């Protein structure tokens, strides 16, 4: 099987469409989303439509749940709150019902998917460090877990004798190894690279890889400005921070 894994789309239609085109070229069997379809950008409804039309299996992110009242906006900064309110105004009852129905975790025969940490997934804790990863290993009964939330691609792994991290663009599964794989962000990367990010899992060779694809940042940023959303949400797209 060849899986496409993506997430943190954040209402950025231009980035999402670029990633979907790249995934079509990859000839993936199935697509999975690690959550946060909504938030920050100007096209929440169109991005959500893509998720449904393409039958992308999706877990709930904190921004997705915020617009349906399942995550308190008090935990967001002012820009994120404004974007959440904007999304609430753009989405229909059927869209809110769909977001409300999204699970926090999904487990398949090959991997698990969760937005943030497998440890208490409803708390939306970040995994930036090896110590944070140590708390997450073993929380889901799967040797491979895909996450997002930080918008920073990263790989954490536990071999029998150690927990470590890797910044490699390719990484292999192997016996007795557990992996937490952050697939980065489609719509708002924060690792200094503005290109949209996604991951591919090829079970035939037990390999995962990260890929980047450029998109029309200018158009996405202009839409944010035209929607009267905070300027910082447009500016950060150019630098990927």
Image: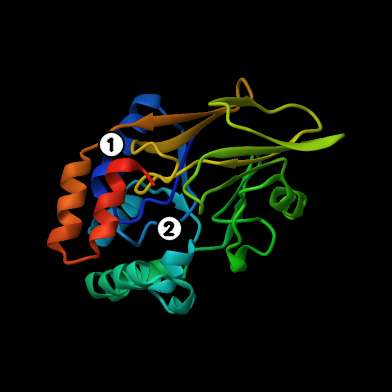
Task: Identify which residue is drawn at 24% across, 56% down.
Answer: 46
Task: Where is residue 232? Give x, y as percent.
Answer: 28, 58
Q: Quadrant of residue 105?
A: bottom right
Q: Nearer the viewer, residue 149 or 1?
A: 149
The residue pinned by badge 1 equals 18
Instruction: Say if 155 sits above or below 64 in the image.
Output: above
Callout 1 environment at 10 Å: few (<14), some (14 to 19), or many (20+)? some
Q: Quadrant of residue 96?
A: bottom left
Task: Tell me: 222 left or right of 141.
Answer: left
Task: Where is residue 146? Give x, y as percent.
Answer: 58, 44
* Helix, strand or loop status at disc 2: loop
Q: Quadrant of residue 21?
A: top left
Q: Residue furthest top?
A: 205
Q: Earlier in the sequence, mark 1 or mark 2?
A: 1
* Helix, strand or loop status at disc 1: helix
Q: CA distance from mark 1 to mark 2?
A: 17 Å
Task: Where is residue 233? Give x, y as percent.
Answer: 29, 57
Task: Identify which residue is drawn at 69% across, 59% down.
Answer: 119
The residue pinned by badge 2 equals 36
Q: Are marks 1 and 2 in contact (CB under 8 Å)?
A: no
Task: Identify which residue is drawn at 30% across, 72% down.
Answer: 82
For the question of whether residue 1 can be seen, the reply is: no
Visual colour scheme: rainbow
Q: Nearer the viewer, residue 112 or 159?
A: 159
Task: Where is residue 113? Give x, y as percent.
Answer: 58, 50
Callout 2 environment at 10 Å: few (<14), some (14 to 19), or many (20+)? many
Q: Residue furthest right?
A: 161
Task: Tell me: 174 left or right of 150.
Answer: right
> In which quadrant of the rendered image does the N terminus lie?
top right
């Amino acid at each position: 099987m060849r899986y496409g894994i993506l997430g943190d789309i954040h209402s950025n239609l231009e980035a999402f469409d670029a990633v979907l085109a790249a995934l079509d070229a990859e000839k993936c069997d199935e697509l999975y989303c690690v959550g946060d379809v909504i938030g920050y950008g100007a096209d929440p409804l169109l991005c959500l439509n893509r998720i449904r039309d393409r039958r992308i299996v999706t877990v709930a992110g904190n921004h997705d749940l915020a617009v349906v009242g399942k995550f308190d906006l008090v935990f967001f900064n002012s820009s994120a709150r404004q974007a959440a309110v904007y999304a609430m105004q753009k989405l229909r009852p059927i869209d809110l019902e769909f977001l409300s129905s999204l699970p926090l975790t999904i487990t398949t025969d090959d991997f698990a998917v969760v937005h943030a940490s497998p440890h208490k997934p409803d708390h939306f804790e970040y995994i930036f460090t090896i110590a944070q990863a140590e708390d997450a290993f073993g929380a889901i009964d799967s040797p491979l877990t895909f996450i997002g939330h930080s918008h920073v691609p990263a790989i954490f792994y536990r071999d029998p004798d150690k927990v470590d991290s890797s910044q490699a663009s390719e990484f292999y599964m192997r016996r007795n190894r557990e992996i937490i794989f952050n697939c980065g962000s489609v719509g708002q990367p924060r690792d200094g690279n503005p290109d949209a990010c996604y991951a591919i899992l090829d079970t035939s060779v037990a390999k995962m890889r990260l890929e980047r694809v450029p998109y029309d940042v200018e158009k996405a940023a202009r839409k944010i400005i035209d929607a009267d959303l905070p300027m910082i949400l447009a500016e950060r797209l150019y630098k990927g921070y």
